[in-house]
Amino acid sequence: MKQMFLAFALTIALPLLTFAKGEEDSVRKALDAYDQAVAKKDVDTVRMLLAPEMLLYEHSVRNDGAKDAFENHLKPEILEGGLQLSFSDLRVTASSGLGLVTRQYRVKGTFEGKAVDSTGNETQVWKLTDGQ
């Protein structure tokens, strides 16, 4: 009876795990596109990947919406010539239409004439929109 239940559970669970793996791959692909766009200073691609309702917190600053986050946070950091970003300990958890990303980051270089060498933890939630 236990073997039959296990076989039944695997029959149901394996397709769900495969679906989750496909979702995880989609999130990793989108995250890679975002990281490459930042590295190349491709602000148009970064802007395209942001959801209009995004919310960004960094330290005590809150940016509401893609326009606020992009114009007042991301764009200045992306376009500043002296910053290099690196990431480690990437973890992706995905389900139908949503992906949770956690990773550690390091920002090194100069920003607004000041030396920067900062590390921290980053959490992102990605949402499937328009089939992408």
Image (cartoon, grey):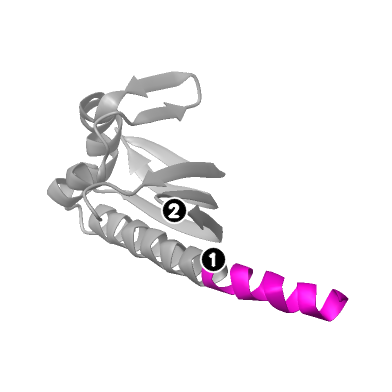
Q: Is residue 71 left or right of residue 87?
A: left
| Picture residue at 24% right of the left edge, 35% below the top | 76
| Picture residue at 45% right of the left edge, 43% below the top | 124
Outermost residue on the right side: it is: 1
Residue 68 seen: yes
Which residue is at the front of the view, 64 or 112? 64
Q: Are marks 2 and 1 in contact (CB under 8 Å)?
A: no
- Dominant SS of magenta comes to helix
Part of the protein shown in magenta:
1-15
Q: Quadrant of the N terminus?
A: bottom right
Q: Compared to 7, does 35 lie above or below?
A: above
Give residue 7's quadrant in the image.
bottom right
Which residue is at the front of the view, 115 or 103? 103
Marks 2 and 1, the one that precedes in the sequence: 1
Q: Position of residue 125 (x, y in %)?
A: 44, 43
What residue does disc 2 label? Answer: 96
Residue 117 seen: no
Q: Compared to 103, does 8 lie above or below?
A: below
Q: Quadrant of the C terminus?
A: bottom left
Give residue 79's quadrant in the image.
top left
What residue type is disc 2 on?
Ser
| Picture residue at 13% right of the left edge, 47% below the top | 44
Q: Compared to 112, does 39 lie above or below?
A: below
CA neighbours of label 1 inside 10 A, class few (<14), some (14 to 19), many (20+)? some
| Picture residue at 26% right of the left edge, 41% below the top | 50
Give residue 40's quadrant in the image.
bottom left
Q: Is residue 5 magenta?
A: yes
Measure how far apart labels 2 and 1 are at the Cα level: 10 Å
Q: Secondary structure at mark 2?
A: loop
What residue type is disc 1 on?
Leu
What residue does disc 1 label? Answer: 16
